[in-house]
Amino acid sequence: VALTVWLAGPLAQFAGWIELLAGDPVAAERELRAGYDKLNEIGELSWLSTTAALLAEAAYRVDRVDEAEELTRASEKSASADDRYSHALLRGVRARVLAGRGDASAAEQLARESVALADETDFLDLRWHTRIGLADVLRSGDDQAEAARDLLAEAVEIAERKGNLVAARRTRDLFEQWGLSAP
């Protein structure tokens, strides 16, 4: 059972993160879906919440927004109250879903909660990721381009501090993709 949990939980999550960083959400979904299904099958909840939140991220990135939202609910249901990792991830995805539906105020609030939760941890990759999510929510708002730009700059600094050069490069690419001037 321990090997099954390891393969379906942490290994699936690591593989999912790698594929997301590589820009391949379809491959990320494949890895995460297998883990998510197995964790559900064996009733293992301790890894399920984060796996569900990461799977929600992958589903969101392939434009399956309703499924992404549903997966954030599954993550929230299985996450313990003090699981900052899962709660930060699921709020980030749900915020972008709400932003896409035009609920800018609720989206910004959730995205800010996501960053605040991540900042309570020493997990730099999570801090990087949540800032990207908040920047994405803000960039479509009125007069929020400067705030989005500042968040991207913070995200680059965090990724570089971690030594995550792929994340730093992908974040720098967002300046151009989103039409923001790089610092």
Image (spheres, rainbow, N blue to C red):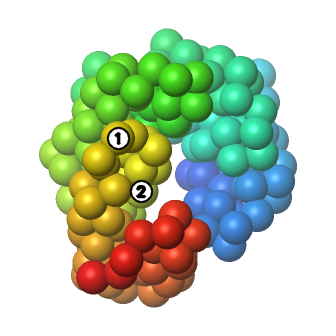
Residue 180, quarter of picture:
bottom left
Q: CA distance from mark 2 to mark 1?
A: 18 Å
Q: Which mark is residue 29?
A: none
Q: Are marks 2 and 1 in contact (CB under 8 Å)?
A: no
At a point 40% along the width and 27% down the height, the residue shown is 104
Whole-percent x and y of residue 105? 33, 23
Whole-percent x and y of residue 2? 62, 43
- For label 2, the SS is helix
Quadrant of the snapshot with the N terminus: top right
Whole-percent x and y of residue 73? 55, 16
Q: Toward the viewer: 97 or 183?
A: 183
Whole-percent x and y of residue 24? 76, 63
Q: Amino acid under label 2?
A: Ile
Decide: few, some or many residues near mark 1? Use Cα within 10 Å; few <14, some 14-19, many ≥20.
few
Quadrant of the snapshot with the C terminus: bottom left
Q: Amino acid under label 1?
A: Asp
At a point 69% along the width and 47% down the height, the residue shown is 61
> In the figure, is residue 75 to the left or right of 181?
right
* Residue ranking furthest to the front: 142
> In the figure, is residue 159 to the left or right of 54?
left
- Residue 142, above or below 95: below
Q: Earlier in the sequence, mark 2 or mark 1?
A: 2
> Which of label 2 and label 1 is nearer to you?
1
- For label 1, the SS is loop
Q: Which mark is residue 142?
A: 1
Residue at numbered disc 2: 132
At a point 70% along the width and 67% down the height, the residue shown is 23
Q: Kindly tell me whether residue 43 is visible in this rendering.
A: no
